[in-house]
Amino acid sequence: MTTKSQLLRRGPQCAKCGLHIGNGAATECGHCRNPQPLSFRELLRMGRLVRDHWHGVGGLPGLIRHPSYRPAFTVTESPHLASGSDREYIAEIRKGNAERGELADLYDRSQGQRQVQRRAVRL
């Protein structure tokens, strides 16, 4: 029987560090793309993105410091979206996907800064 963790290890991985990052558009995790520690401004931005796109317990500290939780963010649009939706709705969906992708990258950098081998999953 295949466990969830075995399935996750088989999926798409970062091209540099080899950690699982999901099947979203990215080929590298946020930490490998930009290994610099988060600046205060980026931390504030991450806090705003967490309020907008993550609905877990504990806010930003809970997301960053949780010992085992790994967030999953939808960063790709559905293929059926373009067929019958209006432009404003599509633009809103794309903006949300871009923000969730940015949040995933910031999460990856925060985990890399803490020397934790866990990255966000991009769907």
Image (spheres, rainbow, N blue to C red):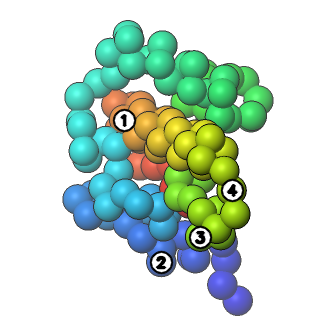
Q: Nearer the viewer, mark 4 or mark 1?
A: 4
Q: Are marks 3 and 1 in contact (CB under 8 Å)?
A: no
Query: Nearer the viewer's eye, disc 3 or disc 2?
Result: 3
Mark closer to the observer (4, 3): 4
Left or right: residue 91 compared with residue 113: right
Which residue position is annotated with label 1? 109
Residue type of the residue flagged with mark 2: Arg
Q: Is residue 92 visible?
A: yes
Q: Earlier in the sequence, mark 2 or mark 1?
A: 2
Tell me the amino acid under the disc marked 4: Ser
> At 67% from the left edge and 77% from the top edge, which residue is drawn?
3
Q: Relative to residue 103, is residue 105 drawn left or right?
A: left
Residue 35: percent from the left, percent from the top? 24, 36
Q: Is residue 37 above or below residue 30?
A: above
Residue 6 image point, x, y percent = 57, 76
Read off the residue under disc 4.
Answer: 85
Q: Between marks 3 and 2, how big is the CA–CA gap?
A: 24 Å
Q: Position of residue 103 (x, y in %)?
A: 49, 35
Identify the secondary structure beneath mark 1. Answer: helix
- Residue, disc 3: 79
